[in-house]
Image (spheres, helix red, strand yellow):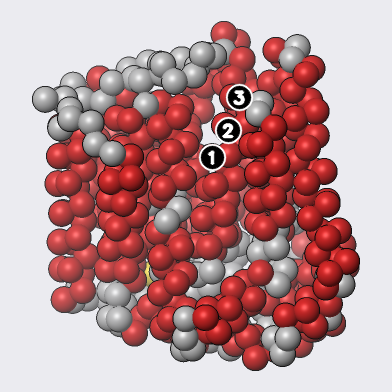
Amino acid sequence: MKTQLQPETKRMPDSLLPPRRFGLQSFIVWNCALLLLFIAFVAASKLFAWGFPQRRAVNPLYAVFDPMAPNFFTLLAVAVFAVFFFLVWRFLADEARRPLSLTLLFFVLSSFAVNASVAMVRGGPAALESPFLRPQDYYAEIGKVEGLMAFLRDYPTILGTMETHGHVHPPGPVLLLWLISQLIGQGPFVAALVVVVTGSLSVAPVYLLLRGLYGEGSATAGAALYIVIPSVVLFTATSMNAVFSFLAAWLFLIGFKLIQTRRFPLAVGLGALLSLSTFFTFDHVFVAFFLGMAGLLFAIQKRDWRSLPVFALIPLVYTSLYLILHSVSGYNLIEVFTSTYGYYKQDRADMVGLYGPESVSALYWFFGNAAASLFFLGVPTAVLFFRGAINALKRAAADTTMRSIGLAALVTLAAVNLPGLYYGEVERIWMYLVPLAMVFAVRILPGFQQGARSTAGLYSILGTTAFQTLLLEHVLYTYW
């Protein structure tokens, strides 16, 4: 019987070094410190009227205080969590090897059950489709698709007739919902079901990414933790960002594989997937930025100049596919980007006017965005992320791979949180970066298990994170 996770680092020749032990007492102290800092930030935001102006807003979160009593669906969600944790324990305790397909199926079904059961806490099954009934949602825009080619060609003009979400994104979200209505059936519940299923599938590439880096035991624990993270659970069943995260998770998986192997087919696949991904959201340029920087740093430090043509294939494939799309349909990527960014700046300018001087607002959200994203990562996961990142930086001098990944991640996270770029909502918008956070968080899990001296360490993390997720669902209304 396995009693604890073991550091498994044999899968990479130039591997991530095993983390140092991280005891339960230190873990508790870090959790309390991070939670107190967040509470202090929320209190200061309320005292000085920083952030969103709504009376019940819980700044810096994009949510309002709307507590509700537990109900039948609360008990259902608790039962789903309990069964899921038991099955994870059986997976970790059973040394018998099982087919990869069975493992992935287990995590995908578990993710769907967790996401759907928690979403139903506020309103039962109707809560799954309610976000798609709002006038500002992408689903309200599918009537504007009168023909696929015409929609793509005229999209910059059509943007001006769209509501909040539609006019700041490429055509991917609206076209996906339109295709669902054409191929599967019309109605918001069908659209919601497809989005929830797609979002639940995100755990598969996350598991494969962690398995390639750390081995099966740590990947199992990491995938289990990913499934109960607040931002993943609360927005997978209510937001198109679940689809964005699914695409981003595959970008991270293929990108990491490419950095490790420098194989031409992976570069072609990554370029193609990136073109599809930015057809849905331009936020994923930050994923491309991270992977490109990590690959370039790795090649420079290894003096592996032969890998540079491999990485050069990515923008070549990306550009070629959009040129083909333009020749076939008239879709203009640059015009769509400038149009959506113009509407985005207009929306942000309107919001900044509500919060006071732009310089003050931008500075507040620089810290507020970081606080909100870390809190919705789950306090225990945020602690693991910090400890894993610190450990990675300490070991970077002796590890080429981690030096490349760590530096690229540091620069990317700094770039994505540039003052004035985002004014809140990041607990949903930055959900696509959770797989990157998991790379550092799961890195520290084996050391924490050794320090805690039992599997109780893992379940204290899973249980605390699940409790935070359920509590947030009952206390906050996380509108988007």
User: Which residue does the numbered mark 3 point to in the structure image?
Assistant: 261
Dot placed on the residue nearer the N-terminal end, 3 or 1: 1
- Which residue is at 17% across, 30% downward? 96
Q: Quadrant of residue 281?
A: bottom right
Which secondary structure lies at badge 2? helix
Q: What is the quadrant of the N terminus in the image?
A: top left
User: Residue flagged by tag 2: what amino acid is it?
Assistant: Phe
Mark 3 Cα shell of 10 Å, populated few (<14), some (14-19), many (≥20): few
Which of marks 3 and 2 precedes in the sequence? 2
The answer to whether marks 2 and 1 mark residues whose Cβ atoms lie closer than 8 Å is yes
Q: Is residue 376 visible?
A: no
The spot of residue 91 in percent (x, y) is 20, 38
How far is mark 3 from mark 1, CA to CA?
A: 12 Å
Circle number at residue 256: 2
Task: Name the residue nearer the viewer: 464 or 328.
Answer: 328
* Figure check: 319 above or below 217: below
Residue beneath disc 1: 253
Q: Which mark is residue 87?
A: none
Q: Is residue 104 left or right of residue 345?
A: left
Category of crowding for the residue at label 2, using alpha-carbon neighbours closer than 10 angstroms: few (below 14), some (14–19), many (at least 20): many
Give the residue displayed 52% in from the left and 21% down from the top.
392
Residue at 73% x, 20% y: name it.
299
Q: Residue furthest left?
A: 1
Closest to the observer: 254 or 436?
A: 254
Classify residue 241 by image quadrant: bottom right
The residue type indicated by label 3 comes to: Thr
Q: Residue at x 73, y 86 (%)?
A: 147
Give the residue furthest to the top: 398
